[in-house]
Structure formats: structure tokens, C-alpha cells
Amino acid sequence: MPSESPDFRASDADREKIATLLRQAQREGRLTLDEFDERVAGAYRARTYGELTPLVDDLPDETGGTSATGPPRSPDSRTGRAALGIMSYAERIGPWRVPPRFTTFAFWGGGKIDLRDAFLDAAEVEIHCYAVMGGIEVVVSPGTRVEDRCTAIMGGVERDVRGAASHGESKVVITGLAFWGGVYIHSQEPDGKH
């Protein structure tokens, strides 16, 4: 989404993202109930990014950082439930909507599933990874709860998740099979540093 285009029309997903940030801020005591009601009503009335942005400019985003000054980044709702890399490369990066179950398959190819900017549709999502003579990389933010249930046959599954919390709001379960291939699950800061 171009951050310099406040006149672009907002989508339902954009309005819902703002409403979610406002709900979180109200739960944390950053907004009174009256402020929350007023801003949520404004979010659902908003037609453009320029009308949405002021509603959250003075609030931290869902990761605790400051809100972007440009229009909200909306998830890519066209990503579906699978990513296939058959003698090619498939990836899901940036803001995208992760369904409760998502499958990625790499055959003589590769794939990257980056969940750092993703919007999880459930408190627990399952990422099914099937790497057959190929490789799949799954990237999460440090502190993400990850449960690895992958199996390897003449292949490998490597996990390097740092600062994983024992509890939290969301959980990512990685299942699947690495057959003559590999699955690499790791955490990484948004700036590219491990």
C-alpha cells in the first residue's frame, strides 16, 4: 500500500484492522470507553486512509511500536490457503491474512512463509510444510510461541526460535514432512537481524 496516498479508498479489512488496534488500546487503558466508542464509529465510517490514520496516530501498534504515519497496511486477502513451489519459488511475506490452516508445498523448489507482518485469523494457526527435494523457510517474530511437529525422512527440520514465550495470545503449529528436503523455522527481527 503506498503510504503517500491518503486519498486511496479503505477496504473493510483496513477498517477492521484499525478497530482491532482500538480494542487493544482500550483493553490496555490507553483509551476511555467514550474515546473508544467514538474512534471505532469513526473507523467504520471512514472511506479513505486519510480518515483512518488519525484514529490511531497517538497509539502504539499491535507489536508495541508506534503506529505508522501512513495509511494502515492491510492484509492481502488473496493469498488463499496454500503456496506451491513446484520447480519454482513461492512466498508469502509482508501483511497477509493467515487462515487457521495454511499449506505450503515445495517440490524441486522452495518457499518462504513470513509471519512477522501477517494477520492470524485464529489464536492458533497450523502451517503445514511439505518439502520434497526442496526447502521451506518459516519466519516468525522473536517470542512467538511455536510448536514444531514436522517429520524428516532423509531430510532435515531445523528450529531456531529465540525468546519463545511459554504463553501468549497466539501460537503457530508447524506440521508436515521434509523428504530429501528441509524445513527451517526461525525467528527474526523485522530489520533483518536475528
Image: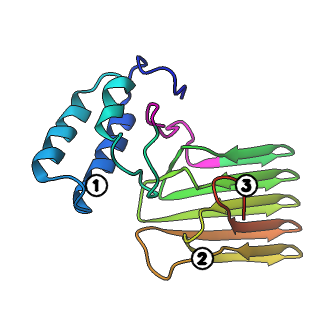
What residue lies at 55% left-to-right and 65% top-to-bottom?
Answer: 126
In the image, taking residue 65 as reference, residue 26 lies left or right, namely left
Q: Main secondary structure of the magenta part?
A: loop
**Three-letter code, disc 2:** Gly
In the rendered structure, find residue 105 and report the number of the disc placed on it. Answer: 3
**Three-letter code, disc 3:** Phe
Q: Which residue is mark 1?
A: 25
Provide the secondary structure element on which disc 1 rests. Answer: helix
Q: Which residues are magenta?
A: 69-82
What residue lies at 83% left-to-right and 74% top-to-bottom?
Answer: 156
**Three-letter code, disc 1:** Ala
Residue in front for this viewpoint, 58 or 109? 58
Marks 3 and 1, the one that precedes in the sequence: 1
* Residue 113 coordinates in the image, percent (x, y): 67, 54
Q: Is residue 70 magenta?
A: yes
Marks 1 and 2, the one that precedes in the sequence: 1
Q: Which residue is mark 2?
A: 163
* Front of the two marks 3 and 1: 1
Provide the secondary structure element on which disc 3 rests. Answer: strand
Q: Residues within 10 Å of mark 3 (few under 14, many from 20)?
A: many
What residue lies at 87% left-to-right and 45% top-to-bottom?
Answer: 87
Q: Is residue 30 above or below residue 149?
A: above
Picture quadrant where residue 137 is located: bottom right
* Residue 44 coordinates in the image, percent (x, y): 23, 33
Q: Give the CA distance from mark 2 to mark 3.
A: 28 Å
Colour setup of the view: rainbow
* Front of the two marks 2 and 3: 2
